[in-house]
Amino acid sequence: MKSKYIFIALIALTSLAFGASDSAIWGKDLIANIAGYDKEGSLHLGKYFTLLQSTYFKPLFFGVLVGVPAAFFIHYAVIGPMIFSHDRKKIYVFTLFNRVVHAISAISFMLIIPTGLVMMFGSFFGGGSFVRLCTEIHAISTLLFIISIVPMFFMWVRWMFIHIDDIKWLMIVGGYLNKDKKPVPAGRFNAGQKTWFWLATLGGVLMISTGTAMYFQDFKLEIIASYGISQIDLLRASAITHNALGIGILALFLVHIYMSVFAIKGAIHSMITGFKEEEEVEILHSSFYKELKEKKEI
Amino acid sequence: MANTWGYGAMTNSLGDIQNAKAIIIFGANPAVNHPVGFQHFLKAKERNNAKIIVVDPVFTKTAAKADYYCRLRPGTDIPFMYGMLHLIFKNGWHDKNFIKDRVYAMDEVMEEAKKWNPKKVEDVTGVPADKLIQITRLYAQSTPGTLIWAMGLTQHSIGSSNTRLAPILQLALGNMGEEGGGTNILRGHDNVQGATDMCCLSHTLPGYYGLSDGSWKYFASSWGVDYDWLKGRFHTKEWMNKKGFTLSRWWAGVLDGKNGNDKIHNGGTNLKNLIVMGNGITSIAQQAKVKEGLDNLDMLVLCDPFVNEAAILTDKQDDVFILPAATQFETSGSVTATNRAAQWRNKVIEPMYESKADQDIMFELAKRLGFYEQLTAGMKIKENKKDFQWPEDATDEIARIIKTIGLTGWTAKRLKKHSENWHMFDEISGRGYGEMKGEYYGLPWPCWTEKHSGSPILYNINRSVAEGGMGFRNRFGLEHDGVDLLAGKGSAPKGSANIDGYPEITKDNIEEVLGIKLTADEKRRIGKNWKVDTSNIIAEKCMQRGMAPYGNAKARAKVWTFPDPIPLHRESLHSARPDLVKEYPSYADKGNHYRVDTQYISKQTEKDWSKEFPINLITGRLVNLNGAGMENRASKYLAALSPEMFCNINPNLAGIHGIRDGSMMWIHSPEGTKIKVKAKYSYAVSEDRVWIPFHFAGHFQGEDLSHKYPNGTKPYAVGESANTVTNYGYDIVTQIPETKGGLCRIEFA
Amino acid sequence: MLKSTYDALKANIGRRSFLKMAAIATAAIATSALANDGITRSATEQEIKNPFPGSENIKTICTACSVGCGIIAEVQNGVWVRQEVAQDHPISLGGHCCKGADMIDMVRSEVRLKHPMVKEGGKWKRLSWDEALDRISAKLKSAHEKFGADSAMFLGSAKMSTEQAYYFRKFAAMYGTNNIDHQARI
Amino acid sequence: MSESSRLKFYCDENRCIGCDGCSVACAEAHELPSGVNRRKVVTLNEGIEGLEYSLSIACMHCTDAPCEEVCPVDCFYIREDGIVLHDKDICIGCAYCLYACPFGAPQFPQDGAFGTKGVMDKCTMCAGGPEETNSHTERELYGQNRISEGKVPVCAAMCSTKALLVGDSNEVSNIYRERVLSAGHGVKTQPYGWNVAYGSKK
């Protein structure tokens, strides 16, 4: 019985009923997908998606949402924030363009992430129009994200490649585990910032594309279909990627906020005014500081 | 069919197919065309392990459910059936007693069958000899077997021969008049049987009475009008007796032989006015000619619930009337299903918008033309009424007049009772329970008297006449060439007073044949013969004696009045096998064929059509559309299932012409016309043929005519009509168009 | 099913169990059996509330093909509101193909022709029934006188009722011509 | 909960002739908008001798419905008789149910500008939704509630060849077994479709 249907499924790919609408999901692939669901040789994406979505994603998101702030709360309580002198010179690090781009992306994040969480925990909010509204906001604010992420990538990418300092930085976790003001090995951007950059840009592109796929749902890209990936499997893969990556982005987003707002007192001002405290640069971006010194720019 | 044994109709019923042990289907696709009827085929498979054999040029959905499938070259059903008969006679599988007692001239068929050995059949039909042998053995040895056909068999220039050879095959096997046997023609539209019985036909009056003076006189008196008045309505008296134009060739009547069209013979005039009621005339072969005909009319009147696409097709600028007719749900009346059983169709709602029921349109026109009183007089006769009630009085009028097919029992009261109590009947036999005991559902005709049970299985001698039994009809005389045409000894229906063959009953022979004595009063009231006996004394007396009013005769395998007394194979006018055309040429041209000179051999030999047009063109139906599709394309759900016209084409054939799946292609016909359709790859057709559905209209030769629809009446799907490219060719007897055996040429568009 | 899944599911049902059911036993038929073995109970009156109060069921026959399937039309205040299942019809046993299942759309289709129209000078024009019939009959009358009755062709239909077909044939005969035909030739 | 107490659909591929009666009956009975096919008929291997089959597909009302498991807003509920239903007021149209569904059953009508999708729609086994039974709102949102009227779901009732069966799963199994047995094709006890998708959970 089973083998018959597998056989049918294989042939069905090439010779299916016409008249079925041109839909990429409910059209001629429908039977092939039904017969091939969770069968040997299939991608098993439907099953994995069901498993992940029903069992893992919610707890993971919840874990990150609660765990990361909790960890920081402990960090704040035990180690406390870094406070740098405001008396020394200020170093101009972010141009107006940098700051505007960052602001737009910040706004989009502030919209996307909470609305995304509302969707993930939709049952908590009771579904319905509020969650539906969040879904729409989630989709529309992606446009803001797109217009900020592209210039951001090009304006910072040259400093974002891996450097020997990054490994050292990672070994000492950026020096955040104590309050010693020992210079931390880092260039203009430290390893943490670099990770966040790559996750936000490349990860962002992935989030945008998977999100767009899920948003428009019923379309057909020949290039993907030519790899033998059905539309429904593309959507399943998109959902898995979107949610898994979402966990990472949420985590680093929380880190980013904690760093800029709490862990380093006043760090947020640099993104408003463009100036960083000299001491902050000297300690947290020591290689960059050295470089500036050599160039006699300070 | 009628010329073989008396009546041209489905002999058994759909439910009865469940009794069959083998089912052979020629040129029919019940899974698509009669899906609900097809459930009985599938049940036969489960109940009896019946084998389904499909013989068809394309692999249909019916074939998908069949046990055996033969891919036949279009138009070669006769060689195939002769191939079967050849093997049947050779192996002695035929029913010798049945043939001796109940069939005339089977020996001549045997002679012809000898010519068709399996090798030869393979050459002509394309069906492998082994397969033919296998199928014939199976079919001949699984009795009872039922034979199914539909338009795939009839729509040929040799259609009438096809429909004669199929019954001969059943007669040879003794499969007639049995439960699970019979020749079962699946009718198309819902009331093909009823409308045909009422003879909306140009060659006969209602009830197949013909056009003779006697018939006209019978009808004049039955209708309550003066015969001379009726005669005066006609051009001259001789035109009363002449067949009129047919649906397939009326356009020739407009064109009057001009521009090289076929000549006509029509009372000194060409056609000026065309009145159409509920007929998708865009589904007629050679649509370009239909358009030309429409363009040259004085007036075109179209009555339909939807816009008849003839109004869209024509370029005529003036005097095109479209009248909103009510649907059948907005009026009531009886409807005859394919198995000759009537059902009462109740009115569901009042006509919507400004629509009017067909009869009201007719009555209004008759008033204005001055013959309303005459038209409706017949309804008032029975009870001598002042006024009539539609449709009950019309039903009763029909029951009063139509004796030939035994509609006497079809009174409005009985038909209504049947439909109201449809839950009291058996699915397979149609027998009634409880209150309806002793009657068959829908009173399948012949239903001889107002108490008769109806006859679910024609020519069944295992039942008494009162319960629907009968022999073959005595219609063709008592003897021919010295051979007795009455049935053999002992082959009368059960319980008959006369156990042998006997002639049809007339006033003169009734006492002798039935062995009774009539009273003086009966003698005064009785009609001349059983067909015109409005007193119904003949039928009543026959019932008492267990005898059928139409006699008990032999079926005839030879129809001596036809061009081919024994059915012979003749290639289609446009044949893909020029070598076979020489061997099996078509008929000589026929003058004045339903008032039109019609070409056969001259068309066939005009040139070697297959050189320029090498591909067989086959038309067919889709499950979601019906006829010209006018009604169904107006439903958004049905239209969505097939939103556009397409052509089934084998990928290998398409590849040669550079046609991709889903791309557009042209189909050119030998008539010089063409259509542009979407190609759909399908393995259902082989590489030498293409298949197109015929339900679309609204496009013409690549041009979209949608803008011609009045506002808000455009159906949800429009497309090219298949009949723009169907070929010239008409049956020699009935003039049915040859839409299933044409040729075409394809190219990438 | 694994116990954990079962428990999870059970919990879900417990939480959201929704009990609006009716006695479906009456509708139990051989083919679509809805047998009552504990999953159904009789419905309360509130639950069976008729969606179309006061409607009546009219038995009629499908107009698609010659099988002659039964149709039950539910009519409320002269409006055909719903197509019901003729489960007890001896030929169709409630079955319909897509055409039969959608018969109601033939009546209520939005693209129906709603009033008589005539094409004049290439334009569609609305007109009254009286005007249309007067004009048509005037033409038929004059052609009858001028060219003879054989100048007209009548095309009837296998979609008509038997009575209509009979009267259409009679109409042509009384107009004076045998030029009448319909779809079925053999 | 055992299989025996659940209502199920089953399409007998030996009988289904692909006439689309079920899908049109469904669309018409529930007056579905275009583009929503609660039920769909698919023919596969069309034109290939011996391999052509047609099947009618809709929500199979799975035993442990994956759609219900993945729904982020918990809009699904399963009736005691096993009919899987959902609440359109809660649904957000995220389509997770579609990704989880092995049968492609959830449908999303085009809704509003930019071709965005509206809330999910699927086969209700003619059992309506959570609104008041046979109320106008229920009819608007979910179509007819025939189960409450004591009627069979319209698709199976109108199936032309009685290929599509609905009812208690044991009962349906029995009918299927009877047909197979009487056709002399050997014994196939479990109809295809009930265990493939949801029985695989380990």
Image (cartoon, rainbow, N blue to C red):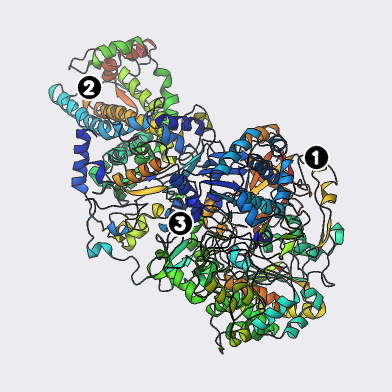
- Residue lying furthest left: A78
Distance from disc 2 to disc 3, alpha carbons, whole Å, reads 100 Å
Please report, as a chain letter, where disc 3 is located. Answer: B
Q: Residues within 10 Å of mark 1 (few under 14, many from 20)?
A: some
Which residue is denoted by mark 1 in the rendering? B578
Mark 3 residue element = loop
Question: Which of these two is toward me, B493 or C30?
Answer: B493
Label 3 CA crowd tier, 10 Å (few <14, some 14–19, many 20+): some
Locate residue B701 relative to residue B43 in the image: left or right.
right
Q: Say few, some or many: other residues with alpha carbon within 10 Å of mark 2 (under 14 / 14 to 19 / 20 or more).
A: few
User: Residue B740 location, x and y as percent?
Assistant: 69, 49
* Mark 1 / mark 3, whichever is N-terminal: 3
For badge 1, the amino acid type reads Pro
Q: Tell me, yes or no, if residue A245 can be seen here.
A: yes
Amino acid beneath label 2: Ser
- Residue ID at (77%, 76%): C149
Callout 1 and callout 3 share a chain: yes
- Label 3 sits on residue: B428
Pointer 2 residue: A85
Instruction: Give the number of the disc on residue B219.
Output: none
The percent position of residue D162, horizontal first and vertical second, equals 42, 50
Q: Quadrant of the N terminus of chain B?
A: bottom right
Q: Nearer the viewer, residue B218 or D201?
A: B218
Q: Is residue D51 above or below residue B237?
A: above
Q: Amino acid at mark 3?
A: Ile
